[in-house]
Amino acid sequence: MVMAETTHFGFEDVPLAEKQARVDDVFHKVASRYDLMNDLMSMGLHRLWKDILVTMLRPPRQGPFRHIDVAGGTGDVAFRIVEAGSPQTRVDVVDINASMLGVGEDRARARGLDGQVRFIECNAEALAFEDRTYDGYTIAFGIRNVPRIPLALSEAFRVLKRGGRFLVLEFAPVETPVLDRIYDAYSFNVIPPLGKMVTGDGEPYRYLVESIRKFPPPDLFSEMIREAGFSRVTCRTLTGGIANIHSGWKI
């Protein structure tokens, strides 16, 4: 008998074919409070980290720039890119979760940015765009939720133009002595109850905390980025290793 391929959903092993649906359910539950919970979970640091991400991207202040922000449903990163770039900057926000995209579309209209930002329901593992379409690619706090990370990395490489930049903002297991114990205590004892108080359900946040611990360490993830074809791969550590920005170029 052939055994079904498995992967992790937090600390639980699940059939690979089931993970996407379970991740979708998590984000359907938290969509309306997603950005508020990011503030509470990171004590507001995610805003600084995203600002650093966009500063590293450096969208040009003049001329066209076409960008894709994957797993960016609520538009938080996309709005920063549009505001940092020229009036000809265009961002396609791609997310597999319709609830998250709905939040982003509402926010874009409220900001008057719906002419520069599009919201598209699509899977990071099979992007519905032609080769060499985009000047830049970002994914913030989304890559660890992708069932087949190498496929998503391969798709990122495919849709970028030559000279395009790839940037990933993601949490990582903290390895700094003392900080690691503080971070674990906060993550497992504070975040799920906080999530239940704010959204009415703490389980999605238990998954999100557990998924950080299952994500590859920075050196291994950097090697995965290289294997996808990217060059000049670097990793910038943020806030004692709580998060990292991984960078690569399509040369």
Image: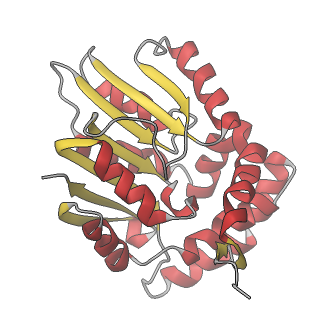
Let me know if residue 52 appears in the view.
Answer: no
In the depicted structure, whether residue 138 falls above or below residue 81: below
Q: Is residue 57 left or right of residue 242?
A: left
Q: Residue at x 53, y 49 (%)?
A: 44
Colouring convention used in this rendered image of the protein: secondary structure
Q: Position of residue 20 (x, y in %)?
A: 67, 57
Of 72 and 55, which appears nearest the observer?
72
Q: Picture quarter containing residue 248?
A: bottom left
Q: Residue at x 52, y 64 (%)?
A: 148
How many numbered marks does the figure carry?
0
Q: Is residue 208 left or right of residue 241?
A: right
Let me know if residue 38 appears in the view.
Answer: yes
Q: Residue furthest front?
A: 1
In the depicted structure, whether residue 183 falls above or below residue 52: below
Q: Position of residue 107 (x, y in %)?
A: 58, 22
Of 23 and 53, which appears nearest the observer?
23
Q: Position of residue 159 (x, y in %)?
A: 31, 42
Q: Is residue 51 left or right of residue 148?
A: left
Q: Residue at x 81, y 60 (%)?
A: 202
Of 142 and 32, which appears nearest the observer?
142
Q: Residue at x 44, y 56 (%)?
A: 152
In the depicted structure, whether residue 6 falls above or below residue 24: below
Quadrant of the snapshot with the N terminus = bottom right
Q: Residue furthest right?
A: 200
